[in-house]
Amino acid sequence: MTKQIKVLSIETSCDETGIAILESGAEKTISILGNALSSQIEIHAQYGGVFPALAKRAHAEKITFLIQQALSDAELLEAVDAPVENISSDLSFLDEKETQLKEHLAPFLTYYKKPDVDYIAVTVGPGLEPALWVGINTAKALSKIWNIPVIPINHMEGHIVTAVFQRINEQDFVLSPIDMPILSLLVSGGHTELVLSSELGKYQKIGQTRDDAVGEAFDKVARVLGLPYPGGPAVSGLAREWRDNEEERLFELPRPMLHSGDYDFSFSGIKTAVLYAVRDLNREMTDEEKRALAGEFENAAIEVLVHKTLKALNEHNAQTVVVGGGVAGNTYLREQLSEKISKLYPDVTVLFPEMWLATDNAVMIGMAGVLQITSNPQEKTRNPEELRADGNLSL
């Protein structure tokens, strides 16, 4: 990373609209020059989950403002001397499905100069396709008007890369020295996967959930317990109280596929077991029971995640374990996995992302973009017209 490059990154895979400006530096460092993020939690809370059409609309409404904010923070936002002509016609490809996006982008591109940015990195999947298209079409528009090449990024690679970069100070990160192979545990609302890497950029999925992702299970259990969305932090909060107070174990839940002999997961059954446990009470749960059930559920889910990760670590002789995705912010998972690996495999390094980078954000997309560009930029850039949203994109 000796040649400095600047990347504008875009993330719209689900319910977070993110724009970041990153700059690569010497000694494998990356600086965050600008970072703007808008959450849609309040919009989707009433539905108990993300509503795709509303997510798409919110992305279209917020993304241009966030681009301005991130560029301003990076001191790269500069007004033109005279309005740029024909912007609206140049963005005519947005007329059919992205009229709201065009309404915001056209004035911005008319009155602001092309910034000092070398590449645009954008999430193309996996995720909600209506949401992904907003980010992709934004990247297409910026690329067309500013003549900047675009790098398509797999959202899950972003989660891996974010854990591999470690913080130096408030805005600077450095690529950690990594022993190969890497085993990545990717845990979020949409994914639960184990991925093996002989080097960064090369991924082999060796295990995945057969039904619900672990983050999805947390959210569903939260709804059963009457907890607010997003459910993961709420369930974990109750579980932490139950554990810290050493309260009685009132429920016993299964550990699905714990000894299945493979690296796959299943969380649908444990969610159903929680539902049945509440139903069998045939009355309103007490606060003590809610804490106990939340604690038992978290214990069961984390036990399975840790067991499968250790099994894969041992059988594939992994030297580094990376944990990424929203559930990577779960403190009990961090404690249990770190403790077990430290005890059983003291020479193995465990890497977690910064807490604020565990959930969806544009910084991780920019980090993945920088790594791709510096490894082989000619193979990684893509004709913007060829970019497509793939909700089921795999590593």
Image (tube, rainbow, N blue to C red):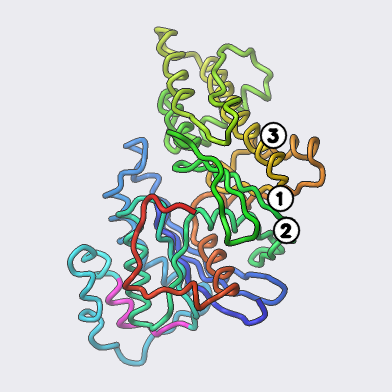
Kindly identify which numbered label has been placed on residue 178.
Answer: 2
> What amino acid type is highlighted by mark number 2?
Ile
Report, in whole angstroms, how far the alpha carbon at label 1 lies from the one at label 2. Answer: 7 Å
Secondary element at image label 1: strand
- The quarter of the displayed image where residue 51 is located: top left
Q: Is residue 85 left or right of residue 235?
A: left
Residue positioned 46% across, 31% down in the render = 217
Callout 3: 10 Å neighbours few (<14), some, many (20+)? Answer: some
Q: Is residue 145 above or below residue 61?
A: below
> What amino acid type is highlighted by mark number 1?
Thr
- Where is mark 1, residue-wise? 320
**What x and y, as percent, mark residue 138?**
34, 69
Callout 2: 10 Å neighbours few (<14), some, many (20+)? Answer: some
Report, in whole angstroms, how far the alpha carbon at label 2 lies from the one at label 3. Answer: 22 Å
Q: Over which residues does the magenta segment extend?
A: 105-115
Callout 1: 10 Å neighbours few (<14), some, many (20+)? Answer: many
> What amino acid type is highlighted by mark number 3?
Gln
Residue positioned 60% across, 29% down in the render = 261
Q: Is residue 84 left or right of residue 235?
A: left
